Amino acid sequence: MALPKISILGAGQVGATTAHLLALKGLGDVTLIDVVEGLAQGKALDLMQSAPIEAFPVQVCGTTDYDAMADSRLVIITAGLARKPGMSREDLLAANANIVGPIAQRLAAVAPEAVVIVVTNPLDLMVALTLQRSGFPRSRVMGMAGVLDSARLRSFIAMRLAVAPSDVQAMVLGSHGDLMVPLRGSITVKGKPLTTWLRSEEIDQLLQRTKEGGAEIVALLKQGSAFYAPASGVCEMAGAVLRNTHAVVPVCAALQGEYGLREVCIGVPAQLGAAGIERIVELPLTPEERAALQAAARQLSDSFT
Ligand code: A3D
């Protein structure tokens, strides 16, 4: 059976690491596309030379040509600038809108049936832009951030309690940034509420570290931002779409009334399958969580107008 075609825009840190993981998982044939001549071609060739050792069955190729996205089942947009120390994600808005907008327009022309996962920051605004420029239904455009923010929180809790990360369950909604909304009351470790493991002040500290999780890595790296965990987040979403798993994961999606919000792209739990977003899952939120989600939505609406 032919493997699905996956195109990745941007062969930088996140794009190339995502290509590597997708190949290792055998999720599809990968086309890497980057504006820098030779970059995508070189990384694709390097990845193909790992195939005899890793025994993955997929093809990876690289190009500068956007039209190579043609007939993709899945398009992943990582093209754009990454943060430097001291920069907020919003500082990237103008530059990255000029990169993502034309990509969204082109992909609508050459890959009109694709499901799109956006990674470029500022994430929630780039999802809204991709939706607008592609003209795609909201079911086929989503952003990766909640999976990453949730994984960061789970890893911090696992490190603090010295338990397996897979024993920690947590979900982070809202905007990818200061206005993320961790569902504090529903965090569990080995099935028991986090409040039975840690004092409230310690939980506050872990939540704050999660909010600053991206900046912590930017400050350490001094150039560029995180890419291993972001690429894992993208692959989790890609796997749910390509393998039609119906898994529920937090994604940035356009809301039309869910959670009482409209005309905004923001992080919420969604069930993913072959068609993209199959449904947005409305979890019961506490009044504080609902207010935090609304505040994040207000700020995003202000930024986009
Ligand atoms: P980087 O390693 O700089 O790669 C970006 C690539 O995009 C570079 O190779 C560029 O040459 C390429 N590029 C630039 N313009 C174009 C264009 N017009 N067409 C095709 N390719 C182009 O950055 P990165 O991979 O570390 O990060 C990529 C983006 O993802 C940035 O905006 C990051 O802020 C964002 N990011 C988001 C998350 C989220 O959780 C949402 C996590 C990590 C990174």
Image (cartoon, rainbow, N blue to C red):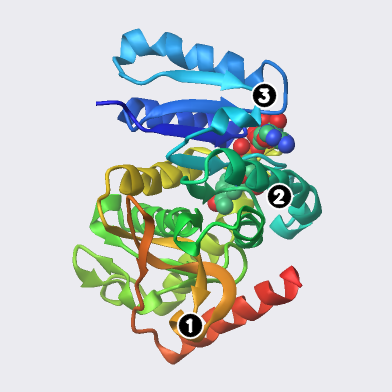
- Quarter of the picture containing the C terminus is bottom right
Badge 3 density bin: few <14, some 14–19, many ≥20, Cα 10 Å = some
Q: Dot 1 corresponds to which residue?
A: 257
What SS does tag 3 mark? loop
C-alpha span from label 1 to label 2:
26 Å
Q: Secondary structure at mark 1?
A: loop
- Could you say which quadrant of the image residue 106 lies in? top right
Amino acid type at mark 2: Gly
Amino acid found under the numbered disc labelled 3: Thr
Task: Tell me the CA gap for discs 3 and 2.
Answer: 17 Å
Which quadrant is home to the N terminus? top left
- Residue 35, above or below 252: above
Which label number is shown at residue 64? Answer: 3
Residue topped by disc 2: 101
Q: Residues within 10 Å of mark 1 (few under 14, many from 20)?
A: few
Pointers 1 and 2 in contact (C-beta within 8 Å): no
> Percent position (x, y) of residue 202?
43, 71
The disc labelled 1 sits on which kind of residue?
Gly
Q: Based on the displayed image, in which of its 4 quarters is residue 265 positioned?
A: bottom right
